[in-house]
Image (spheres, helix red, strand yellow):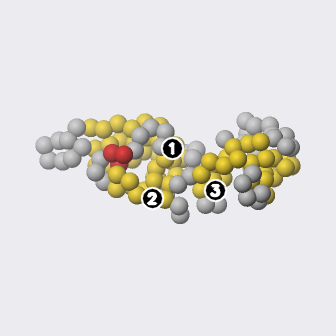
Amino acid sequence: MAKQQNEVRDLQEGSYVMIDDAPCKINSYSTAKPGKHGSAKARIEAEGVFDGKKRSLSQPVDAKIWVPIIERKQGQVVSVDGSDMQVMDLETYETLTMRVPEDADPSPDENIEYLEMEDQRKII
């Protein structure tokens, strides 16, 4: 899996983090002061990039956490067939099959942007 390790204190809203082995985008990040016997804690509220589930995490700010490497790519719609569509990557010219998002109405020859992490893809 394409990921790297960072400290929790280096995270910020809008960045990505792995929670329950799923890549998530951070919606809110807050910290609590260190207590009498412990270190400062960070609370992270995030939403799954590919599945849309909400997840939360509470960790010490000096703990290490996995951060996924998600690539933003350009593609061109080749054909649309019901709920699936063929997309050609504009860098590698590879043809991929993707699900049509519910709120989108793509047409052939339209340029799109999508996120990719290993074998998971999502049109944005």
Inspect this view and state whether residue 36 appears. yes
Secondary element at tag 2: strand
Q: Which residue lies furthest to the left in this view?
A: 36
Secondary element at tag 3: strand
| 3D distance between C-alphas at marks 2 and 3 | 18 Å
Residue 72 pos. (x, y %): 62, 48
| 3D distance between C-alphas at marks 1 and 2 | 15 Å
- The residue singled out by tag 2 in the image is 4
Residue 17 pos. (x, y %): 46, 50
**Residue contact at pointers 1 and 2, CB within 8 angstroms:** no
Secondary element at tag 1: strand
* Residue in the image at 13% along x and 43% along y: 36
Residue type beneath disc 2: Gln
The circle on residue 25 is 1
- Asked if residue 103 is positioned above or below residue 6 in the image, the reply reads above
Among the two numbered marks 2 and 3 on one chain, the one whose residue lies closer to the N terminus:
2
Q: How crowded is mark 2: few (under 14 residues within 10 Å), some or many (20 or more)?
A: few
The circle on residue 14 is none
| 3D distance between C-alphas at marks 1 and 3 | 15 Å
The circle on residue 120 is 3
